[in-house]
Image (cartoon, rainbow, N blue to C red):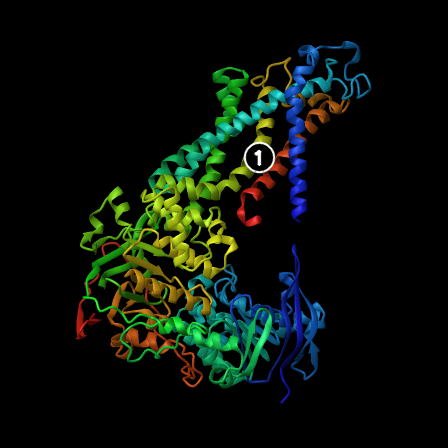
Amino acid sequence: MKDIVTVDHLRVEFSTDGGTVVGVEDVSFAIAPGETLCVVGESGSGKSVTSLSLMRLVEFGGGTIARGAMNFTRADGSTLDVAAASPQVMGGVRGNEIGMIFQEPMTALNPVFTIERQLTDGLMLHKGLTQQAATARALDLLKSVRIPEPERRLRQYPHELSGGMRQRVVIAMAMACEPKLLIADEPTTALDVTIQAEILALINRLKRENGMAVLFITHDMAVVAQMADRVVVMYRGRIVETGTVQQIFENPREDYTKALLAAVPKLGEMKGKAQPERMRLIGDEAARAAQAAPKARKPKVLLEVNNLTTRFPVKGGILRRTVAQVHAVEDVSFSINVGENLALVGESGCGKSSCGRSILRLIEPASGEIKINGNDIRALRGPDLRRARVDMQMVFQDPFASLNPYRRLKAQVAEPIQNFGLASGAELEARVLDLFDRVRLPRDFMNRYPHELSGGQRQRVAIARALALNPKLIVADEAVSALDVSVQAQVLNLMMELQEDLGLSYLFISHDMAVVERVAHQVGVMYLGRIVEIGPRAAIFDNPSHPYTRSLLSAVPIADPAKRRFADDLNFKPISSPIHPLGYKPAPSTYAQIAPGHYVLQN
Amino acid sequence: MKRFKTTKGLIGIVVLLAIALVAIVGPMVIPPDAATAMDMHARRAPPSLAHVFGTDQLGRDLMYRVILGARTSLEIAVSAVVMSIVFGLPLGLISGYFGGFVDNVLMRLVDTLLAFPALLLALTISAVLGPNVQNTIIAIGIAFTPFLARIIRGEALKVTQMPYVEAARASGTTDGMIMVRHVLPNIRPALIVQGTISLAFAILAEAGLSFLGLGTQPPAASWGLMIQASRDQLDIAPWTAVVPGLAVALTVLGLNMLGDVLRDILDPRSK
């Protein structure tokens, strides 16, 4: 069968202040009808530039197609070289014969138009349908992407829909004109794992039913394993390796592919292992072998949290009175031992971040007890609270926003030490040097500014800053989520190494089950502000007992093409609202112990 | 691109230095009564060799007046803007950083001041205090404070929500230190832009006050006063407006160029 699209020696250039920058160079691939081609790579690999070129949208971002051809087989069987097509011709192809799904479902929809308007616009433009016919078709489309209550959705605005529903609308829009090629650029990266599973299953079903070709751009090897027929691995604007998904995963030829695959944690690979293990990094085998056997220490409780509750007011009305409350954290209890990790996992809005920040009292809990080394944090005021923070520090998700762009790194790492007057002059200098050494950053980075560093390097600075006070507990809030997979592995290994050396404990807040499986001693699964299940890692992963834990685990993509999970349509129960009227008294959390240390929420 | 930035900055600095030089050296070289000496035979004389910039309706030499007026205008404008920063910056910073009750109280105060047109406010203050240079500065300074406070508050609010501020708080930095170390440097670009724009407006505000008889008192010269005086003779003697107008425009241009460059120099990301 004739390929839908063949890309030949594509080269895209961007002109910048500093001269011409090559976005992609010598990229060639082909996609057959009914085939999914995954383009995978880390940030800056040129994968998005490739997909935007195919839509000729790259020009709007300042790029030019300098060389190469992109032959697209049109609906009438003729061949069009997209690279040379006129803007008028492209206007008829874009959104009509090539559909596109973007990463951010909120920004891809116009907030001031109803869903009906967004869907029917393209139909009336490209297919010349009447308003009535277009509306009928829009309804069909919403049904085909399995949105509940499709008639009502037509009259709603984007903000009235959940993230998952919005992405379904975006897909419905892309499918509206029955494109021959669907380009999906990181379509599930901004979504929770259960919604990701739904969307991936939906794309698979639509592909099967319509015989479309799919160009799927992603950074996530696990998603690649689940979705791809063939894979293109990109690195720095060039193709590293092309092959079928089985070839790439079972028998990668290139070192880069091997390294990329090695760094990906696979859910289930830690079965039967009692202790966390460092991530695999190519060239780092020696360090891994040297991983010290965990010191047998008597379990000693470091942090104890009892019945913690945090609420946020919802203001409304002319007088901005509190009209309702968000029950962000609801009756949560757990403890962390010295030198151990507790991972809090859950989807966005489940209260895991609020929980971590309540413990540091960066936000004020409504009630409950927080004790670190027996010291009651909630009883402290003013200067005492400030001093108590010596024992607990935080690493944030976004390495770009958690460092002050106007201060030298040296000053930012030294700040906590200066705050408590622990050292000054040469002693301070020496301690900062030592911290840079500890997080394996070159010493000459000390005088640099944050923008001169990569994401991973910045996160190391953030860790150095958190270590400056020799804390006992570090709250790591999605600390590796924004990083590329190989960088993520390096930072995780650094964190585990520091734990072994310094006897730190981590409260590890994450949405990534595969990472959690690798690093945690204890796992707490959060849902709607409560911990629904908590226990030793092995117990949670081997014997998930709460229905939510089970559905969460079943939605995680596994980086192994032999273990495909999203063949059929999935529909997970949407998370209900944690907003309750004032005076609402939720029932206390009661747990049943199903194994030693393994508790499941009863109500 | 980079070279353009530095030439732009260089032009700005050269223009401002030249103006400052004229404002400082001018009064030393020119006899003090040169700006007030009237020549009734050469009223509204167009620019010529005798009067390079022409003369005004009383036959006063515009070159001397614009040079001697520079000092008054710049002194008032710079002092007034510095004053509005001294009051407005802490007000906006504290309001934006602490939010909540503090913010409500301070901003209602600022809103009350904003409800009056700035010139009317300056007029009232100036009328109450009496017309002299010092009071003009106080009047314009107070009138400009709420605008600055509003802008600083907005910026401070934005910066306070950044994770690096939370990180600083988590590592035991006190509120005062967070404001100085983290919030202030990040609102500096907005402060520079607003400051340079305010300078231009302050020159014009002084003109307005002078026009109403409350700023610079005739026969002393200021740019504003000169522009206002040219109002009824625009058709017959346009140079009386063009000369002081150009002086204001040149100053503002120089300030804006310098402001842009200053902002870039202070931003480590632009290097």
Please report, as a chain letter, where disc 1 is located. B
In-front residue for pair A426/A566: A426
Residue at image coords 38%, 54% = A435
The residue that appears at 51% across and 29% down in the rendered structure is B82
Of helix, strand and loop, which one carries label 1? helix
Residue in the image at 38% along x and 57% along y:
A463
- Is residue A506 or residue A413 the one in the foreground? A413
Residue B111 showing in the rendered view:
no
Which residue is identified by label 1?
B196
Residue A426 picture quarter: top left
Q: Locate residue B176 relative to residue A96 in the image: left or right.
A: left
Residue at 42 percent across and 63 percent down: it is: A160
Position in image of residue A219 (x %, y %)? 49, 71
Q: Can residue A154 be seen?
A: yes
> x and y percent of residue A555 in the render?
37, 76
Residue A386 lies in what quarter of the image? top left
B20 relative to B44, above or below: below
